[in-house]
Image (spheres, grey):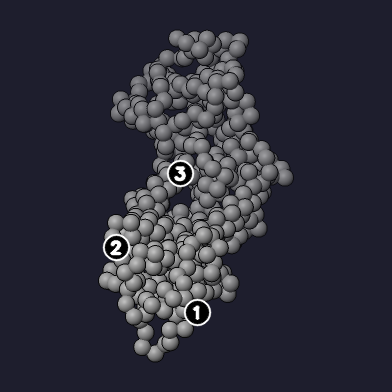
């Protein structure tokens, strides 16, 4: 099974829960058996069950596709942020001479308005960044190009909302993108100022010069603590008439503008992005399944039963999947022969070597479940399954063969010869061979006793 992070394990578990909630219970008999055999607490067993179902039904691969789409969507949003930041710098310095407060509004106005709305939404509504977050989720789903990936985003949001982690995840995204935009603005602003000569003025019709002087000094107070220059009162007053053709005045205004951008544009977004990421990391580490949810609560008796129950209560799967043994050679031992639904015309069992066990004939649900439970605890290194090819290879028999094969390190199918005086139907035998080839299981019409005893032919 694919190695996943703890968050992805929980995510897939929640996806399976939502899927069962809307579409009904899945065929989970083998998943439940493997989860019980693995042991652990209820949360661990629920996750193991869900991960097996997700692997079987293609949700794990859908998650990979969704994550690839999410990364690509994030790259596209980052490119958009960089271009937007560059546009702000061009807009700020697009006039000749540069109106300092018009430039300041272009550089910080939209950022500060959205920052204020983000903070208010966080305080009063507990939600923020919804538009940008929905855009990212929408892009992620579209770029994933997997129909099953559509189930993943709702599951992720529900899981995070229960712990109020969505605000910090989206907060990291929103503030991170705005930080990127502000850094792009800063870099291009410095580039333009380093390669062109700008003059700076301020203009007003109804405000006095003292108002602009006070505003300039107030805005420059914090940047001044970081070493950025602030224009003198004489420079500010003189810039109200015309752009000063003095190098020191141009440098003072340019430094003041850069300092204000850094202090009121870059630093707040940087600090908020770091804070949100810190809260997200802490919350993610503490994320757990809510075992009180109905979808999980009803699994308690199936995964941690107070008494063992035998019998099949779920329908056979609608589709068979390729067999991949989950048993390693080091975890398995011995050899075993089992038969499926043989009649009295086949003498059973054949003479077996001493080191080959006889699991009998599986002709009831009770015998099937009893053997599967046994194999989950003591998986054999080699398993031979005898089948009567006079019977049709129905879906139930093939599902049982696949389930048995997954419980052994290596499996072979023995297609029995017809009893004396009878002949095999060639078409039916061909159906068996095609079905076993689809399961990628080797088969033969002779007893694989030498292989069972020695591990080779």
- The residue lying at 60 percent from left, 12 percent from top is 355
Is residue 354 shown left or right of residue 326?
right
Question: Between marks 3 and 1, how big is the CA–CA gap?
Answer: 60 Å
Instruction: Name the outermost residue toward the bottom.
Output: 206
Q: Is residue 174 visible?
A: no
Splitting the image into 4 quarters, where does residue 160 fall?
bottom right
Viewer-side residue, 397 vs 455: 455
Q: Which mark is residue 214?
A: 1
Question: Between marks 3 and 2, how big is the CA–CA gap?
Answer: 57 Å
The numbered mark, 1 or 2, whose residue comes first in the sequence reads 2
- To which residue does mark 2 refer? 197
Q: Nearer the viewer, mark 3 or mark 1?
A: 1
Instruction: Name the spot of residue 353 as percent of width and height, x first.
Output: 57, 10
- To which residue does mark 3 refer? 60
Q: Secondary structure at mark 2?
A: loop
The mark total stands at 3
Splitting the image into 4 quarters, where does residue 126 fall?
bottom right
- The residue lying at 42 percent from left, 61 percent from top is 182
Q: Is residue 452 visible?
A: yes
Q: Secondary structure at mark 3?
A: helix
Residue 232 vertical placement versus 23 (above, below)? below
Instruction: Name the spot of residue 199 as percent of width and height, x first.
Output: 32, 69
- The residue lying at 58 percent from left, 15 percent from top is 356
Instruction: Name the spot of residue 40 as percent of width and height, x first.
Output: 67, 40
The numbered mark, 3 or 2, whose residue comes first in the sequence reads 3
Residue 386 vertical placement versus 214 (above, below)? above
Q: Secondary structure at mark 1?
A: helix
Is residue 198 shown left or right of residue 376?
left
């Amino acid at each position: 099974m694919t190695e996943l992070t703890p968050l992805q394990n929980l995510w897939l578990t929640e996806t399976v829960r939502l899927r069962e909630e809307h579409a009904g219970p899945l065929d989970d008999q083998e998943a439940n058996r493997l989860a019980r055999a693995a042991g652990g607490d209820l949360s661990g067993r629920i996750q193991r069950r869900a991960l097996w179902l997700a692997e079987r039904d293609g949700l794990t691969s859908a998650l990979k596709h969704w994550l690839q789409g999410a990364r690509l969507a994030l790259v596209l949003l980052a490119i958009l942020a960089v271009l937007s930041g560059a546009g702000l710098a061009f807009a700020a310095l697009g006039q000749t001479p540069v109106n300092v407060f018009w430039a300041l509004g272009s550089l910080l106005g939209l950022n500060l308005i959205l920052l204020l709305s983000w903070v208010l939404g966080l305080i009063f509504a507990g939600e923020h960044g919804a538009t940008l977050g929905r855009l990212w989720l929408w892009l992620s789903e579209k770029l994933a190009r997997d129909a099953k990936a559509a189930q993943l985003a709702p599951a992720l949001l529900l899981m995070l909302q229960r712990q109020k982690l969505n605000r910090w995840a989206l907060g990291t995204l929103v503030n991170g993108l705005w930080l990127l935009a502000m850094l792009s603005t800063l870099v291009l602003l410095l580039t333009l100022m380093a390669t062109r000569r700008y003059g700076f003025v301020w203009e007003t019709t109804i405000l006095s010069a003292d108002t602009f002087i006070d505003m300039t000094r107030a805005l420059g107070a914090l940047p001044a603590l970081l070493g950025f220059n602030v224009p003198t009162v004489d420079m500010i007053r003189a810039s109200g008439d015309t752009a000063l053709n003095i190098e020191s005045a141009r440098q003072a205004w340019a430094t003041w503008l850069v300092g204000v951008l850094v202090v009121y544009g870059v630093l707040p977004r940087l600090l908020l992005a770091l804070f949100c990421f810190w809260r997200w990391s802490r919350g993610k580490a503490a994320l757990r399944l809510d075992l009180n949810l109905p979808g999980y609560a009803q699994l308690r008796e199936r995964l941690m039963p107070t008494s063992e129950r035998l019998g099949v209560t779920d329908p056979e799967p609608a589709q068979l999947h390729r067999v991949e043994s989950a048993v390693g050679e080091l975890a398995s031992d011995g050899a075993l022969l089992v038969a499926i639904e043989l009649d009295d015309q086949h003498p059973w069992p054949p003479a077996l070597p001493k080191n080959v066990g006889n699991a009998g004939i599986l002709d009831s649900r009770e015998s099937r479940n009893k053997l599967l439970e046994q194999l989950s605890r003591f998986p054999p290194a080699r398993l031979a399954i005898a089948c009567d090819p006079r019977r049709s290879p129905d879906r139930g028999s093939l599902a049982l063969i696949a389930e048995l094969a997954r419980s052994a390190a290596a499996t072979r199918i023995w297609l029995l010869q017809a009893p004396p005086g009878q002949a095999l139907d060639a078409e039916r035998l061909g159906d068996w061979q095609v079905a076993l080839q689809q399961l990628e299981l080797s088969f033969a019409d002779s007893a694989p006793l030498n292989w069972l005893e020695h591990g080779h032919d």
